[in-house]
Image (cartoon, helix red, strand yellow):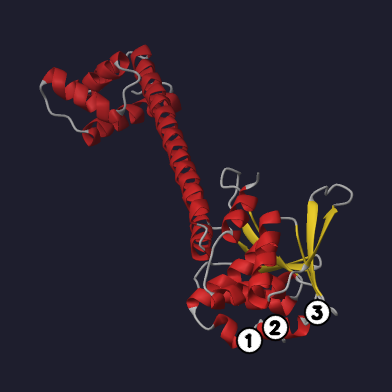
Amino acid sequence: MSFARNVKDELAKIDTNELAKISELSGIIHSSADMQNKITITTENNSVARKVFSLIKELYHISPQIIVRKGYNYNKKRHYILEIKDNYQKILDNLGIKKATPEDFILADDELMRAYLRGVFMMNGSINDPKTSRYHLEINLNDAAYASYINELLNNYDLNNKLLHRDNSYMVYMKEAEKIGDFLRMLGAFKAVMYYEDIRIYRDHKNMTNRLNNCEQANADKIIETSNKQIKDINLIKEKDLFDLLDEKEKTVCDYRLKYPDASLLELSEIISLETGNKLTKSGIYHRFNKIKNLAQKIRNKGRVK
């Protein structure tokens, strides 16, 4: 079972007061129903279908006609179609559906607004499982004005959602993991939030661990590369019998570099300080290797220093 289906199943089980039920049903019908001469609501989710049926029956004391059809071509999922033919216009009026946007009383407070958006998402929303490669939540709507309205409604909750025109529909979407979690929490899908946040935290921790490992590997590679260059410089100076041009401090770091080829500058400074009893900082050892490097460079440029 998909994560999106789990979310909708959870949302369909939320019980609210009568006013919130009216707002939720308004969102369901306004965002998805065919309202030509009757109300026709179609969904692939049987939990959502049961929710719609129970809302209509509880609020208006009528039982919608239910038709179950199997999808065609590649979509073999069942489609649940609910039809209301009698007094459908009175129901639409009661649900505040008279124009492109709902009547003000449908969204009179925060609880009703969340109920309305819950209805919209159950019918038109989808969400990627957080285990997949990317975070993504979307709500697909057919009407441009209505899609813009839903986009602005969601922006009231600072969700950083955006609106995109795609083919013959309009997609309101979110891509930030934290904002998607906030949206699920806002709708009341708390089990889904716990699952989502657990996976998100695990993925973030894993990504951070990978970045740290990559960083450590890069640092290790850099240490080896630097050490190899220093060893080449030292060997060149010795091959040319110019080692005595270095002072005793510089000769000391040469000896220790050859002895500890895998040590970083910091590690090398600590080893020298411990074994010789003379305090040597990383900066000090870096300064000495610069002198050694300059001498080796002169040898390479001139063949031999006179």
The furthest residue to the right: 73
Q: Nearer the viewer, residue 187 or 52?
A: 52
Q: Residue 57, how many percent across, how many down?
A: 68, 71
Residue 171 at what x, y percent from top left?
69, 66
Query: As shown in the figure, which amino acid type bears the numbered disc 2?
Result: Ile
Kind of residue at badge 1: Glu
267 to the left or right of 36: left
Question: As drawn, is 262 to the left or to the right of 122?
Answer: left
Q: Residue 121's mark?
A: none
Query: Looking at the image, which residue sits at the far left?
Result: 277
Residue 75 in the image, given as x and y percentages of width and height: 83, 49
Q: Nearer the viewer, residue 61 or 147?
A: 61
Residue annotated with mark 2: 97
- The residue shown at (48%, 56%) is 190
**Which badge, 1 or 2, is on the more N-terminal residue?**
2
Cα distance, mark 3 to mark 2?
17 Å
* Above or below 31: residue 278: above
Front in this rendered view, residue 266 or 305: 266
Question: Label 3, on which residue?
Answer: 86
Relative vertical location of residue 102 with respect to residue 190 in this rendering, above or below: below
Badge 3 amino acid: Asp
Label 2 crowd (10 A; few <14 / some 14-19 / many >=20): some
